[in-house]
Amino acid sequence: MAANASAKTARTARKPAAKSASEKSGAKTKPTAVSVEAFIDKVPNETRRKDAKTLLALMKKVTGEKPVMWGSSIIGFGRYHYKYDSGREGDMCMTGFSPRSTSLVVYVLPGFARFEGLLKKLGKHRHGGSCLYINRLEDVDLPVLEKIVADAYAHMRKKYPA
């Protein structure tokens, strides 16, 4: 039995130390210097690549912001600083999108409660949290999508003034 106790002690002794609160609060998704256009040009699916170029133009028009890569796959517009009650804080884009392999993800950071009427008019999509999932832009009404993005961005600008 002593051997089992020693083995157990040895196993627990090898566990890495728990992360401090400051280490936990570090955001993983940060702006990078990667070219947005180069990233889009490397999207393997031709339809998704074409849709990403359309979304890029739509979001530039709506936000008036220069697109920036956030992490390895999010094309973001604008920037805000958040701080949670837990003490976690960081920066994130105010809106953006990602041409994922399974769908386009549009980030609607205020959530969707305020957009129920528009979502009914949007067309084929799914949503959850702050993510709007669209398989192909041809499946949705682009002026409705533009209105959702514009209203969400305006909300974020008002909530987090520069």
Image (tube, helix red, strand yellow):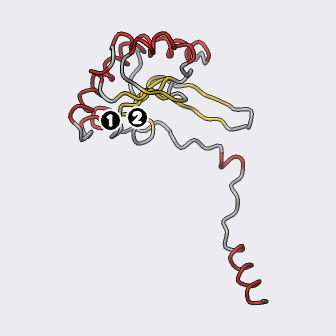
Q: Are marks 2 and 1 in contact (CB under 8 Å)?
A: yes
Q: Mark 2 points at which residue?
A: 69
Farthest residue, direction left:
46
Relative to 69, does residue 94 appear above or below in the rendering?
above
Q: Give residue 75's quadrant in the image.
A: top left
Q: Which comes sooner in the sequence, label 2 or label 1?
A: 1
Q: Residues within 10 Å of mark 2 (few under 14, many from 20)?
A: many
The quadrant of the image that shows the C terminus is top right
Q: Position of residue 119 (x, y in %)?
A: 45, 15
Q: Give residue 56's quadrant in the image.
A: top left
Q: Where is residue 127 in the image (x, y as percent from the top left)?
A: 47, 27
Which residue: 55% across, 22% down? 111
Which residue: 63% across, 29% down? 82
Q: What residue type is labelled 1?
A: Ser
Q: Name the residue under label 1.
A: 35
Q: Nearer the viewer, residue 120 or 30?
A: 120
Q: Where is residue 53 in the image (x, y as percent from the top left)?
A: 27, 25
Which residue: 30% across, 38% down? 39
Q: Distance between the residues labelled 2 and 1?
A: 7 Å
The quadrant of the image that shows the N terminus is bottom right
- Kind of element beneath mark 1: loop
> Left or right: 63 with respect to 113?
left
> Left or right: 65 with respect to 48?
right
Q: What residue type is labelled 2?
A: Met
| Residue 88 - label | none
Q: Residues within 10 Å of mark 1 (few under 14, many from 20)?
A: few
Q: Nearer the viewer, residue 27 or 131?
A: 131
Relative to 55, does residue 105 appear above or below in the rendering?
below
Which residue: 53% across, 44% down? 28
Q: Give residue 38's quadrant in the image.
A: top left
Q: Where is residue 25 in the image (x, y as percent from the top left)?
A: 65, 43
> Left or right: 161 with respect to 5?
left
